[in-house]
Amino acid sequence: MRVLVTGGAGFIGSHLVEALLGRGDEVWVIDDLSTGREENIAHVMDDPMFHWHYGTVLDRELVAGVMAQCDMVFHLAAAVGVAYVVENPVKSLINNIRGAEVVLEEACAEMKKVVLFSSSEVYGKGNGLPLREDDDRVLGPTAVSRWSYATGKAVDEFLAFAYWREKGLPAVIVRCFNSCGPRQTGDYGMVVPRLVTQALRGEPMTVYGTGKQSRCFSYVGDVVSAALSLSRHPKAVGEVFNIGTDEEITIEGLAKKIRELTSSSSPIVFVPYEKAYQGGFEDMKRRVPDLTKIRSLIDYEPSLSLEELLVLTINDVCRRLDVPTPQGLPYASSSGFFASASVKKA
Ligand code: UDP
């Protein structure tokens, strides 16, 4: 296959690119490096099957030119991270809505299959747990930027459904729940690499709110494998799927676990939301995906426990910070654990 990955230099995108190249595909990437990093794809730059385009998905000519050469597109180029979106509301809305608009329009002109990466943010505050794909969405007021992220992503989903129903464009939508793993940075809010970095540096570990809110963290390799399987499944077209795990942990529990695994003596400090984000900020108390739908279609089982995922991430952050791996960290790399945690060939 010849595949376009928008946002291919990002955290999830770069893992997807690797998996596609690994299965013998030819891959084109468009990325404006706004939150992506060239370092994420440096190791594939010289691969003759890899084609790099530094640019934005708002550039219609660029998107059209690359789309014409490809069989399908994975659309991941978007503003990510609650902290980033709250700090850059205009750029985030424009990139997320207009970007998807351009990609879907150009894909439709060529009738190329689209896999649209959406987010569990679209559920907003949620309407009961676990969150099912057909649940009602519950959002707060328009004056609070967080909900613009949820709304922008929902508009992308509406557009994908509209192109499928009205024009027959084959589109698959995936909603990712707190993906995590190597290459994720804490620069845009993501709690796991932030807490790991703080713990390794001996800095205070910032837990927002009471820390009683909980999340389910999924391994990026599982997200990529699932998206690849769905991209090939004929019954996935015109459908939306949760991708995540249902192993839940409070953020305070997460901070304690990371502190223990890194043998850190960092204090855990509680930061009020209005200091961490902006006044009026609202957080979800819990966010757990219902995985019934994805499991009804593909063989989907998270391959790592939360502890294994944290160890993998701690190792990656150590490498990036150029500090030694903490003594006593379980699953030494020689045990083969890291090899088994690499992205499965889908
Ligand atoms: N969070 C935290 N400390 C941080 C960053 C985030 O306590 O330094 C909290 C955040 O308020 C949320 C959870 O961790 O309750 C997950 O945040 P993240 O931005 O990773 O993802 P979200 O679930 O908000 O999309």
Image (cartoon, rainbow, N blue to C red):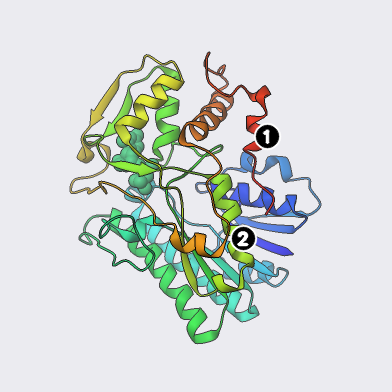
Would residue 172 be visible to someone looking at this image? yes
- Measuring from the top left, give residue 163's x and y in whole percent: 50, 80
Is the CB of the residue bearing disc 2 within 8 angstroms of ligand 1? Answer: no
Q: Is residue 306 left or right of residue 271?
A: right
Q: Which quadrant of the structure image shows residue 138? A: bottom left
- Residue at 23%, 44% in the rendered image: 278
Would residue 58 be visible to someone looking at this image? no
Name the residue tied to disc 2: 229
The amino acid sitting under disc 2 is Ser
Ligand 1 quarter of the rendering: top left
Rendered view: 65 above or below 186? below
The amino acid sitting under disc 1 is Ala
Name the residue tied to disc 1: 339
Q: Is residue 110 left or right of residue 320?
A: right
Q: Which part of the image, by quadrant, shows the N terminus?
A: bottom right
Farthest right residue in view:
48
Q: CA distance from mark 1 to mark 2?
A: 21 Å
Q: Is residue 42 left or right of residue 116?
A: right
Q: Secondary structure at mark 1?
A: helix
Q: Is residue 259 left or right of residue 61?
A: left
Q: Which quadrant of the structure image shows residue 292? A: bottom left
Q: Which of the pair 162/346 is nearer the observer? A: 346
Q: Which part of the image, by quadrant, shows the C terminus?
A: bottom right
- Residue at 44%, 53% in the rendered image: 79
- Measuring from the top left, give residue 289's x and y in whole percent: 39, 54
Q: Secondary structure at mark 2?
A: helix
The disc, 1 or 2, on the residue closer to the chain's N-terminal end is 2
